[in-house]
Image (tube, rainbow, N blue to C red):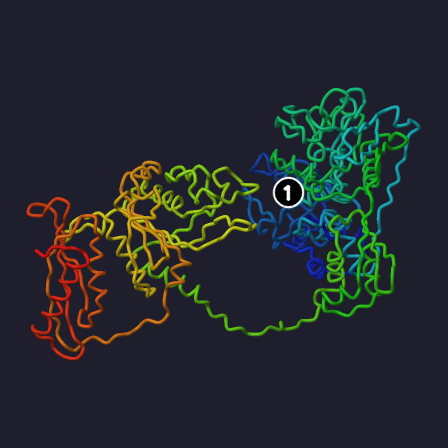
């Protein structure tokens, strides 16, 4: 919102300097974002009279003038042709600095000395364009600064308003704020309309069919207008607030718009079929050309102003080409209406059409100002365009809007603001704001809110008014009272962080995917129809179908990320996500939200180099990651079994992780069909761990065992065992003997082929022996080793090779 210092002073008396006024407005919540001084620093541009004008001897288009500034006569070279000897002009003397940082200096032009410059309106910043220099009134005294002599010195304020302060989108609204703060009154204009003896009912008719979108519509008829340029004072005032002059009628509607904050629209009455105005919704697909020459396609939600045959305006936004004010216009129908803010906002946003009118209507106009603004504009049009105003006003207002009344508690206001104002002091504040105070009890008010304050809806809004008018600087400053808490992370949080660090240390990158997924994506995972993962939590109002259910597994999100990266030729990936999945809980409104760790590996094991071969990651790479996690969490012993697996794993290349009877998770290669379903043409290995169960079986106490000072020795065993027997049972069987001297048992060879019977496999186990008390010798190791061999033969029915 742009206002000027002089315009504000027409409505409220104050003695504040421009800077003081700027500070006052900002402290009222109307932040002044910019200040521009019109005529400031231009005191060297003075009133002068042209005593002589002659042709420049060396230039056909230049004049040589002698100009008197009241103190001396100066020689001036001028290129303008619109003046003569005896005219009073604006003389920029030597040293003057004009807008654009143009400094006037003594100079020679085509051999003739020029001691200043005769100025045009454009050169003084008074107009965007001008055809010649300013010709001043003859009664102005010589030597007086031009801006002082013409009363043009002013200060322009650019105010940044928040969307709720629609009442301040006018000069009157801002003047009302100043008056309330200073304790003065607003000098409201009382428009007086001189009416002719022709009743308006004989000239025009207004029918409102959609009163829910247009609760009130008023109009006046003005006949015999002469369309022409506006007077200089009106042009300058509009240009000062950023609006260009069009003609005297349109300029008046814009002037009243800025003055009262209420949009008006002038129709060429002779172009209205049947002399009728009909307010109703548009037809679906209706086409309408607005004043900017653009054809708009309307919907049934758009409100239009129509005549007896066609649409003539988009209500509250912009008029149409078919009824605009033209040079030939003589009779005018002037509209002042109130439109539903939501309807205007919806149409404005859909069409991408934002105007000064829609800006105000969509924030909420003042329904009680309609007739005042209408009469103000009608009287000005009659004055400036020579029109005759028809007798009476059309005012269609079938269901008057009710006033809002808000209950206000004095003690609550004092408690919220930390101040101590009396009820009488608060009543004075509300009266200054033109609110009506009804005393219910000594400290309980019912406040009648004026129609211009659409932002006041609740008690807290009234509390803010008290804070603004009493002064934010009068609210006491107190240090916040708070106790210091030691916000140490919980065990769960520590383990989360530890798990992330483990994954990053293993070369993984964390990703974050949506918590939503498409229901159909579970089909890509080859899940059975009765699989628990298909039981999902559905969103009531999803943005898109692809995000309509909560995820029950992290796998689809990771595969989508992997597919996109592989498409960009990022062929080696290690990605993980530690996030929640959402599983419906029977008999409960909210789902369970367990935390899961999921990760994928694909591509090569190490970057290719001259000293290492290019090997693809495999099952044992992902198994190594799992084992590292188990070691970090001090979880053990665990069993890797090939059952209880999801169908998206490759048969025979995946396993589950059991700790006792607890299923901690699973890992392995994904099924080839999964690769195809997600557009991935290389093997992907996946791990999925239930973090809640990891935390449950993990140990915070890690036993530290000092290394032995004595040397080790090892013995190997080569055995034949049935194919279906897992090799891990051999190590478990050896560990189950709990021989103190056995430091570890490791499988180092696996063979099937010649010299191995069908249905069997050859396994080689290396057993390392070491004592913490002495150096072991052969006759001590041999019986221990024999005991292990005998146990393997007895329990696992193996054959020693």
Residue 668 versus residue 475 in the image, above or below: above
Figure quadrant of residue 680: top left
- Callout 1: helix, strand or loop? loop
Whole-percent x and y of residue 557?
40, 45
- Image vertical order of residue 63 relative to residue 174, above or below: above
Residue at 40 percent of width and 62 percent of height: 695
- At 9% from the left edge and 69% from the top edge, which residue is drawn? 782
Closer-to-camera residue (675/266):
675
The outermost residue toward the right is 197
Residue 722: x, y in percent?
Answer: 17, 49
- The front one of 606 and 384 is 606
Q: Is residue 668 left or right of residue 75?
A: left
187 horizontally vs 124: left or right: right
- Residue on which disc 1 sits: 122
Quick one: quadrant of the C terminus? bottom left
Q: Nearer the viewer, residue 710 or 410?
A: 710
Residue at the bottom extreme, as displayed = 773
Q: Nearer the viewer, residue 608 or 543?
A: 543
């Amino acid at each position: 919102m742009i206002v000027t210092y002089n315009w504000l002073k027409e409505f409220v008396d104050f003695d504040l300097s421009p800077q003081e006024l700027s500070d006052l407005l900002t402290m009222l919540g109307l932040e002044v974002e910019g200040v521009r001084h019109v005529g400031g620093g231009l005191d060297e541009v003075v009133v002068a009279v042209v005593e002589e004008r002659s042709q420049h001897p060396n230039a056909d288009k230049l004049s040589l003038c002698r100009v008197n500034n009241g103190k001396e006569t100066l020689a001036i070279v001028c290129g303008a042709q619109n003046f003569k000897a005896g005219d009073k002009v604006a003389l920029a003397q030597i040293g003057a600095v004009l807008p654009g940082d143009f400094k006037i200096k003594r100079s020679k032009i085509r051999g003739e000395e020029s001691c200043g410059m005769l100025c045009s309106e454009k050169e003084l910043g008074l107009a965007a364009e001008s055809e010649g220099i300013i010709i001043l009134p003859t009664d102005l005294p010589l030597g007086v600064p031009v801006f002082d002599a013409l009363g043009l010195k002013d200060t322009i304020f650019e105010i940044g308003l928040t969307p709720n302060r629609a009442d301040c989108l006018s000069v009157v609204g801002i003047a009302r704020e100043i008056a309330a703060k200073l304790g003065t009154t607003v000098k409201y204009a009382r428009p007086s309309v001189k009416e002719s003896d022709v009743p308006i009912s004989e000239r025009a008719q207004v029918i409102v069919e959609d009163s829910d979108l247009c609760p009130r519509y008023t109009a006046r008829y003005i006949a015999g207008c002469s369309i022409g340029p506006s007077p200089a004072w009106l042009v300058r005032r509009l240009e000062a607030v950023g609006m260009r002059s069009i003609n005297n009628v349109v300029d008046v509607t814009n002037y009243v718009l800025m003055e009262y904050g209420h949009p008006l629209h002038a129709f060429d009455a002779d172009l209205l079929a049947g002399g009728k105005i009909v307010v109703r919704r548009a037809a679906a697909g209706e086409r309408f050309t607005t004043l900017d020459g653009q054809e708009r396609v309307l919907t049934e939600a758009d409100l239009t102003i129509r005549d007896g045959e066609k649409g003539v305006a988009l209500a509250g936004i912009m008029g149409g080409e078919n009824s605009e004010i033209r040079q030939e216009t003589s009779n005018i129908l002037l509209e002042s209406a109130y439109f539903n803010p939501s309807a205007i906002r919806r149409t404005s946003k859909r069409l991408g059409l934002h105007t000064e009118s829609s800006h105000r209507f969509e924030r909420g106009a003042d329904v009680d100002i309609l007739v005042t603004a209408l009469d103000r504009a009608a009287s000005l049009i009659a004055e400036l365009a020579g029109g005759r105003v028809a007798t009476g006003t059309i005012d269609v207002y079938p269901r008057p809007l009710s006033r809002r009344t808000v209950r206000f508690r004095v003690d609550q206001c004092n408690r919220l603001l930390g101040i101590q104002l009396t009820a009488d002091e608060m009543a004075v504040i509300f009266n200054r704001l033109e609110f009506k105070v009804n005393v219910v009890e000594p400290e309980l008010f019912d406040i009648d809110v004026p129609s211009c304050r659409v932002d006041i809806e609740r008690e807290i809004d009234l509390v803010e008014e008290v804070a603004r008018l009493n002064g934010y600087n009068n609210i006491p400053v107190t240090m916040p009272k708070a106790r210091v808490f030691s916000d140490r992370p919980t065990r769960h949080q520590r383990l989360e962080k530890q798990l992330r660090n483990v994954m990053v240390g293993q070369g993984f990158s964390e990703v974050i995917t949506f918590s939503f997924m498409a229901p159909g994506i579970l089909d890509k995972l080859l899940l059975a129809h009765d699989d628990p993962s298909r039981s999902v939590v559905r969103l009531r109002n999803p943005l898109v179908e692809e995000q309509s259910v909560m995820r029950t597994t992290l796998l689809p999100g990771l595969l989508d990320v992997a597919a996109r990266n592989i498409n960009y030729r990022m062929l080696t990936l290690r990605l993980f996500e530690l996030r929640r999945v959402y599983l419906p809980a029977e008999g409960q409104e909210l789902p369970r939200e367990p935390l899961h760790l999921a990760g994928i590996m694909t591509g090569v094991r190490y970057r290719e180099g001259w000293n290492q071969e290019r090997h693809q990651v495999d099952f044992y790479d992902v198994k190594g990651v799992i084992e590292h996690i188990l070691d970090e969490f001090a979880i053990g012993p665990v069993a890797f079994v090939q059952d209880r697996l999801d169908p998206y794993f490759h048969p025979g290349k995946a396993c589950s992780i059991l700790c006792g009877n607890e299923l901690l998770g699973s890992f392995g290669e994904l099924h080839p069909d999964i690769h195809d379903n997600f557009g991935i043409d290389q093997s992907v290995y996946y791990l999925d761990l239930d973090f809640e169960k990891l935390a449950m079986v993990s140990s915070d106490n890690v036993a530290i065992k000092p290394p032995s000072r004595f040397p080790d020795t090892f013995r190997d065993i080569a055995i034949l065992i049935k194919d279906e027997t897992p090799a891990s049972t051999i190590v478990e069987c050896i560990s189950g003997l709990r021989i103190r001297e056995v430091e570890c048992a490791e499988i180092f060879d696996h063979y099937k082929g010649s010299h191995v019977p069908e249905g069997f496999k050859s396994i080689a186990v290396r057993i390392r022996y070491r004592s913490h008390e002495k150096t072991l010798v052969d006759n001590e190791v041999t019986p221990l080793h024999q005991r292990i061999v005998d146990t393997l033969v007895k329990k696992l029915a193996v054959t020693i090779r």
